[in-house]
């Protein structure tokens, strides 16, 4: 007889180590508003409630970007999250920024977990072996659920080199059919893919691979109110910072999903809190509270990300690093994560929210040609017509330039005009530029790289301690025609 039954999938993605409740941005009729959301104690309470309601038929799955992003995570190289995740009852996860401390450290963290880190598309370049399992089977009261993990394919392509080390990452197209067949042969009634490719790539992946029942997507921080249906697969994604949990209730029969319902749950004060997990969170955060509570300045405007072409949080960062470098231009990566900092005091904890790595402020000399090519490359990696060519975050953050672009144009010809101040950029001129990380200015371009000896946190602190609140004011670098 064919197996029939019910299962509830609970999705976390891109929590970025936000252990406690925090401000989150919401886009409403008159623009951005902010509410306090998230926190693992609430997530645990919500998960416990749903497990109880479903007769232990609820599986909590994590799509990665879990061990990196806040001060406690950075200061413990991810270890602060381990007891919390184990108590939360996560059943499997995959990875992206979780590799920020290097593959060896992620292997150490994985060994401490009560559940597997899955990455079917990851192999050691030298041996061809997988450092992490590709999939596993989970038994529920009614069904056997097969879970496949697809880690971020950009880890060895656009991320700093130590993330991947000697590992290589594919987009999973070749690996998934093998994993799916093995899971089905092993008795899987339902196949779930937990992926960190990003929504455009995950939609493309689902369209190319047969046999996926559900794809839980991460990386691009979409808040999907309604699942996408792609080649028979249900695809969902559930925001960022642990501000949301995606709930997908499934009725399964005859080897397929016969009925489903979905809800994107905002994790707010209406959610019950788990006291035991709350105590673990406090234990993880308490050693750093005094240090992180130190006020370094004040902002008169909300600092937040969430805009494709720029944000107030990145404007602050760019202004700070440009001041330290004494340059007219500044570049930074278009990071998507970082909980908002509301008007009022800015603390050291907020500095970690803005840029948790605290990289050094660097300067480099770029020719006008290199500047234009770098921006064109970034636009292609953001807006490529081929989803698998989309390997960036938001558009690169820029101070000191004004670029007029046509997004729909072919690769290499999106910039219509680019101005440095009041003068059109000169391809032959050399421009001294401030930047942070190789995602700001790649190592392969430019000359005369110098370390200013000042970290990003110190740069922001210097800017904020000039005696007046920060009011913003960096003009938009991009204008879409």
Image: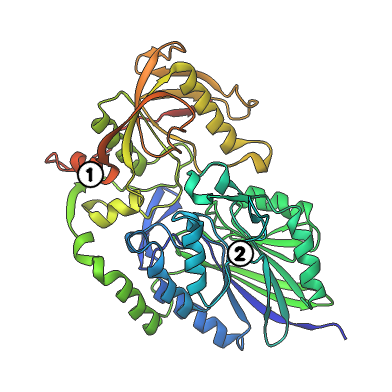
- The residue lying toward the viewer, choosing from 372 and 316, is 372
Q: Dot 2: few (<14), some (14–19), or many (≥20) neighbours within 10 Å?
A: some
> Could you tell me how many numbered marks the image carries?
2
* Gap between marks 2 and 1 measured at Cα: 37 Å
Which residue occupies 63% across, 83% down?
A: 57
Residue 65 visible in the current orientation: no
Which residue sits furthest front? 126
Residue 193 visible in the current orientation: yes
Circle 1 residue: 458
Image position of 438 with respect to 8: above or below:
above
SS class, disc 1: helix
Q: Check whether the beta carbons of the residues at disc 2 and disc 1 lie within 8 A of each other.
A: no
Image location (x, y in percent) of residue 232: 78, 61
Circle 2 residue: 132
Image location (x, y in percent) of residue 447: 40, 23
- Image quarter hosting the N terminus: bottom right
Image location (x, y in percent) of residue 155: 55, 48
SS class, disc 2: loop
Image position of 383 with respect to 103: above or below:
above
Which residue occupies 35% across, 64% down?
A: 76
Which residue sits furthest left? 467
- The residue lying toward the viewer, choosing from 251 and 211, is 211
Mark with earlier residue (2, 1): 2
- The residue lying toward the viewer, choosing from 134 and 259, is 134
Image position of 360 with respect to 441: above or below:
below
Which residue occupies 55% across, 59% down?
A: 95
Q: Dot 1: few (<14), some (14–19), or many (≥20) neighbours within 10 Å?
A: many
Image location (x, y in percent) of residue 372: 49, 21
72 on left or right of 189: left
Quarter of the view holding residue 316: top left
């Amino acid at each position: 007889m064919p197996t029939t039954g019910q299962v509830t999938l609970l999705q976390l993605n891109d929590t970025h180590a936000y252990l406690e409740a925090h401000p989150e941005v919401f886009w409403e009729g008159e623009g951005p508003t902010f509410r306090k959301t998230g926190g693992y104690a609430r997530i645990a309470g919500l998960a416990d409630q749903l497990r109880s309601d479903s007769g232990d038929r609820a599986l909590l799955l994590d799509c990665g970007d879990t061990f990196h992003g806040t001060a406690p995570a950075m200061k413990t190289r991810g270890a602060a999250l381990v007891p919390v995740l184990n108590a939360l009852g996560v059943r499997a996860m995959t990875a992206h920024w979780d590799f920020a401390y290097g593959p060896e450290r992620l292997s150490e963290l994985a060994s401490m977990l009560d559940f597997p880190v899955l990455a079917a598309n990851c192999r050691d370049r030298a041996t061809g072996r997988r450092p992490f399992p590709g999939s596993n089977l989970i038994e529920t009261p009614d069904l056997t659920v097969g879970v496949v993990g697809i880690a971020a394919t950009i880890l060895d392509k656009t991320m700093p080199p130590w993330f991947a080390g000697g590992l290589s990452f594919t987009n999973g197209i070749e690996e998934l059919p093998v994993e799916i067949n093995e899971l089905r042969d092993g008795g899987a009634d339902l196949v779930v893919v937990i992926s960190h490719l990003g929504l455009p790539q995950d939609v493309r992946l689902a369209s190319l691979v047969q046999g996926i029942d559900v794809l839980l997507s991460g990386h691009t921080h979409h808040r999907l109110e309604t699942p996408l249906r792609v080649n028979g697969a249900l695809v969902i994604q559930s925001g960022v910072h642990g501000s949301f949990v995606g709930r997908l209730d499934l009725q399964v029969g005859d080897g397929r999903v016969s009925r489903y319902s979905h809800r994107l749950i905002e994790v707010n004060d209406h959610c019950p809190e788990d006291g035991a997990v709350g105590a673990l969170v406090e234990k993880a955060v308490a050693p750093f509270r005094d240090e992180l509570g130190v006020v370094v300045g004040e902002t008169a405007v909300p600092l937040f990300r969430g805009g494709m072409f720029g944000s107030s949080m990145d404007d602050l960062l760019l202004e700070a690093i440009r001041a330290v470098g004494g340059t007219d231009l500044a570049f930074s990566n278009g990071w998507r994560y970082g909980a908002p900092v509301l008007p009022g005091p800015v603390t050291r904890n907020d500095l970690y929210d803005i840029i948790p790595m605290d990289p050094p402020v660097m300067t480099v000399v770029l020719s006008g040609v290199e500047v234009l090519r770098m921006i064109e490359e970034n636009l292609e990696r953001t807006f490529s017509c081929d989803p698998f060519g989309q390997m960036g975050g938001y558009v690169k953050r820029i101070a000191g330039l004004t670029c007029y672009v046509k997004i729909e144009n072919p690769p290499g010809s999106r910039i219509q005009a680019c101005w440095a101040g009041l003068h059109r950029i000169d391809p032959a001129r050399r421009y001294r530029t401030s930047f942070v990380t190789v995602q700001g200015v790649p190592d392969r371009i430019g000359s005369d790289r110098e370390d200013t000896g000042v970290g990003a946190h110190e740069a922001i602190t210097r800017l904020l301690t000039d005696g007046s609140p920060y009011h913003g004011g960096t003009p938009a670098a991009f204008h879409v025609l």
